[in-house]
Amino acid sequence: MSVFATLVEHLADLLQPLLGASAAAGAIVLFTALVRLLVHPLSRAAARGQKARTELQPKIAELRKKHAKNPEKLQKAVLALHAEEKVSPLSGCLPSMCQLPAFFLLYHLFSNTTNPLLTHQLFAAPLGNHWADALGDGGAFGGAGLVYVGLFTLVACVAAFNFRRTKRMMAANPAVPVVDGQPMTGMGAMSKVMPFMSFFTLFTVAVVPLAAALYVVTSTTWSAVERAALYR
């Protein structure tokens, strides 16, 4: 943890001549982008795995029709198909799961109250404060409040972009995911909620320290652009 904090502090020192008092905020954004760039190969692997699994869905649908009355035979046929096509049932999930520790570590770093970076500011907003603090110090359109207005606007734009993209993808590929030859239960309800998931980031930005909010906004924006490029 201290190693990452030290790296961000060094970045802040480098950015000081360019960004002045907001150098620490700029360092958080830049460091988050650099970490996302490092784990990009895992994102590409996840995209390849997801595409491979999607391409198998028509064949799996045929197997479900063929073995509708024999679940055991259906499961064996689906596993054999995956083996024949050299596609793991979890090929799109494992690379994504491998990225989670890095994301949780960064979130903890930028929300830790002992982090000296939280004593810095982004314009008029202290990095260690929350939206509630900004509302109590000048209101929604005060100096600190305007920083959050900007973040909320950016998050809303990214969420709207993700919403439209997710709806298009689900309309183009309405097939219910299958695990071991069986349709996943509850996926109908999840598919209705999924397009709205990006808007939950607005709540996150509102309740976490500004430093963590900058990390969340940067990472979310990166993910939106990355997924649009990889899953087009």
Image (cartoon, rainbow, N blue to C red):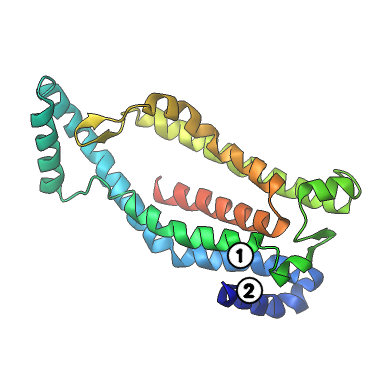
- Say left or right for 8 vs 143: left
Q: Which quarter of the rendered picture does the C terminus lie within?
A: top left
**Dividing the image into 4 quarters, which one contains the N terminus?**
bottom right
The quarter holding residue 109 reads bottom right
Q: Are marks 1 and 2 in contact (CB under 8 Å)?
A: yes
**Amino acid carrying mark 2 in the image:** Val
* Marker disc for residue 109: 1
Residue drawn at (39%, 24%) of the image: 188
Left or right of 91 in this view: 140? right
**Neighbour tally class for label 2: few under 14, some 14-19, many 20 plus, Cα within 10 Å:** many
Q: Say which quarter of the image contains residue 38.
A: bottom left
User: Helix, strand, or loop for circle 1?
Assistant: helix
Q: Is residue 145 visible?
A: no
Dot 2: what SS? helix
Residue 3: image location, x then y, percent: 56, 77
Toward the viewer: 166 or 83?
Answer: 83
Residue at the outermost front position: 114
